[in-house]
Structure formats: structure tokens, C-alpha cells
Amino acid sequence: MKVEIKTLSPIHIGNGEKYKELSYYKEGSKIFILDFDKVKRNLLSNERNSRFFSDFILKLKQQSFQKTQRKHFWEEFFSDYLREKPDKLKDYALYSVECFSKKSRDIDCFIKQNNSVYIPGTEIKGAIRTALIYHLLSRHWNWFEKKLTDILEKFATNSLDIKNLRRAVVSLEKEMQARVLIASQKAYDSRTDLLRFLIIGDSNLKDPKDCLFVSDLEIIGSSRNISFSQEFCKKGESFFCDIKVDYKQFSLNKLGFSDEHKGIISDIKNIFNICYEFTKRLIEEEKKYDEYPDSVKRSLEFIEKENKPDSPVIRIGKNQGYFGLTVGLLIKDKNQNLFDKVVRPATKGRTYQNNFPKTRRVVVLDSQQKDTCGWVKLTLKDSI
């Protein structure tokens, strides 16, 4: 079965790599991601440019000038060459996309395969996993609440023992995942993990020039001015991947899964409904964040309307935020005191008096409009 993954906001899925300042060239509102080997080969074919370029590389190796000087030198050199041969830029570029960032700095790359954009199946599965844990843990809340209370009494009564508190919470997280997702409920074992039977492939590939843009990711709610430059996939893009539940070759009864587990994994629609419920609560929480500009609030209203039980919205990528990646929202809803005295200090590494989490990430668009990020909608398709 196929599933459509439609982006409802810009998304960034990183691959751990960055485009350094010398890996791209800006021209107007376009940014050209350069094939540096091709640049070098073409430039060295000309004697004057070869001498100029060799001198440039030598200075880089000797670190004889500062970062801003290095960037200026590169831009001046490249601009001079392009003035002579302006048609050469496209020959040096792997691709070009729209750029809203005014800054010259490293750019976080979007994940690609053979220089084509895709959405990994692991991203979708990871978001589903968080929703399932949230759902199942709510059924085991009494057990989990007692565990958190024990941690509070042991480490957070008098002087806060942050180091051991954090260790205890990490240990409890592993125990919790085993209890709600593993058949034996004793220790984590991938062979009896409920999500083993949910198979999601990587999406189809897309040309970067058709679906990416470069802009700044801004941290709001912080006392500091923090931003990063990233490649984003545009809002409104559709990707497709295979999805199936494959447990016929296994005996769920023999493995020891509960009736609740079997009910969830028996039909993808049940999994989708659980994702819908988790996202419904997540968006409700996001809408309460006062620091969001009006443009982001409007986007969240739109995303909320798109979230349906049979075609849920999930949040993926690097910029999901704390509540999108954890069961922190469940703890906050069920027991605010445990959230304040166990979750906050364990997460931040210190006592934390402000509203937690106090920051959010937004994408800065053209005309200084801002948008939320990471939201996609899943829709089952019989065939494409």
C-alpha cells in the first residue's frame, strides 16, 4: 500500500552535513550549490585564473586571513570570473534554489540520495513510534506515575541531585518503552518490538530545484538572538512511499503481545487514528504559545483542520520540539507537579522556573513572514 506524505509547512530533515561558505554562491534571490571539483577543474583550465585560484588556496592553507576576508575574496574572485563567462555558473552548480537568507554562513543540508531529495521511512516511523508510546503509556499511567513519584522522592526532595535524577529518568524511559511496546515487558528486545511489524519504505526522489529553498531557522522565546541557515522542503510538496503491516509470518500470541497490541497492529487505520489523537493534543499545546507571530498561528489553525483520523498529521525532522519528540505532554497533563519537579530538571540539567519549554523554532520566509515547521499529512493510497 502507498501513503502520500504531503508537507503542510516547510520541513528540514538533516543528514549531519553542512554547505560551507565556499560551497555555494549567491546571485540575487538564488543560491547555487557548487560542485567544487568541477569549479576547480574549469578554473584551472585558464592560466590567469589558475594562478589566482592557486594563490587563493595557498592563503586558505596558511590561514592568512579571517573568515570574513576569505568569503569576500572568494566572492570577488568568482564574480570576476563570471563577469567574463556568466553562462558558466550553471555548469558549476549541482543545483540552484530560492534563498531567503541574507546571511553568509554554513547551511544545514537536507538529506539526499544521489543528490535527490527524499523523506526517509525512519522519519515517519519515528513519529508514529512517539504517538504509539503516548497512547499506550496513557493506559499504563498509574504504573508510570508511581515510577516518577519514586524518582521525585529519592532525588528531588531536599537538595536536587540533578546528575542521578537524570540517570534515573533515562533508565525509566527504557523501562517504559519495554513495558508499552515490547511483548515480554521485561527489557528492550527488537525481536519483540511492536513496531517491528510496521514497515515503511523511503519515499520517491525529487530534484532539489523543484522542492527545496534556503532560509533561516529562528529560535523565538530566547533572550538571545539565535538563528541557523537550513535547506527546507517547501510547503505543499507530495512524496509517496510504501507502508504495510507484516506480521502474518509471526505468531503474535506466541510472542506474547497483548490484545491491545494486536488490535493496534492489525490495521494501519488504527495506527493512523492514534497519530491523529497525539497530534490533536500537540497542536492544542502549540497554539497556546504566546510568542508565536500571527503568521505562525494562522498556519497552526490550517494544520489543525487538516488533521483527520484517517489522514493524520505528524511532525518530522530536526525542528519538532520537545513535546513532539517525547511523552512530556502526557506527564504535564496528568501530573503538573511531576512535570515541574522531575521532567524539567532532568531535561534542562537544572531547576527551571520559566514556562517549559520556553522556546520554539520558526522558519523565516520572504517579506519576513514566519512559519512553523516539520508538519506533514499522511494519506493512504491504493495505487499511484
Image (spheres, rainbow, N blue to C red):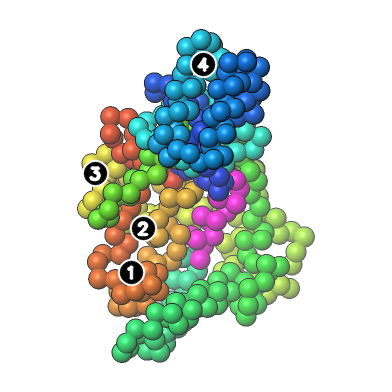
Q: Which of 137/161 is in front? A: 161
Tell me, yes or no, whether the two marked residues, 3 and 2, touch with CB atoms within 8 Å.
Answer: no
Q: What residue type is labelled 1?
A: Asp
Whichever of callouts 2 and 4 sits on the residue coming sooner in the sequence is: 4
Report if residue 115 is visible in the image.
yes
Identify the residue position indicated by label 1 in the image. 333
Disc 4 to disc 1, how far (Cα)?
61 Å
Badge 1: residue crowd in 10 Å (few <14, some 14–19, many ≥20): few
How would you rate the neighbour count of disc 2 (Cα within 10 Å): few for under 14, some for 14-19, many for 20 or more? Answer: few
Q: Main secondary structure of the magenta part?
A: helix
Query: Residue drawn at (29%, 71%), measured in percent from left and top?
Result: 352
Q: Which amino acid does label 4 sit on?
A: Tyr
Q: Which of marks 3 and 2 is nearer the N terminus?
A: 2
Crowding near the residue tagged with mark 4, few <14, some 14–19, many ≥20 C-alpha atoms within 10 Å: some
> Mark 2 is on which residue type?
Arg
Name the residue tied to disc 4: 81
Task: Answer whether residue 120 is magenta in the image.
Answer: yes
Q: Which of marks 3 and 2 is in front?
A: 3
Which residue lies under the disc numbered 2? 281
In this rendering, would 9 be left or right of 158?
right
The residue depicted at 50 percent of the width and 75 percent of the height is 170
Whole-angstrom CA distance, mark 1 to mark 2, is 10 Å
Residue at 57 percent across and 34 percent down: it is 58
The residue positioned 30% from the left and 39% from the top of the image is: 370
Span of residues in magenta: 119-133
Q: Relative to residue 31, is residue 284 depicted above or below?
A: below
The Cα–Cα distance between marks 4 and 3, rounded to whole angstroms, is 43 Å
Q: Which mark is residue 293?
A: 3
Alpha carbon separation for disc pair 3 and 2:
20 Å
Q: Are marks 1 and 2 in contact (CB under 8 Å)?
A: yes
Q: Do tag 4 and tag 1 residues touch (Cβ < 8 Å)?
A: no
Which part of the image, by quadrant, shows the N terminus? Answer: top right
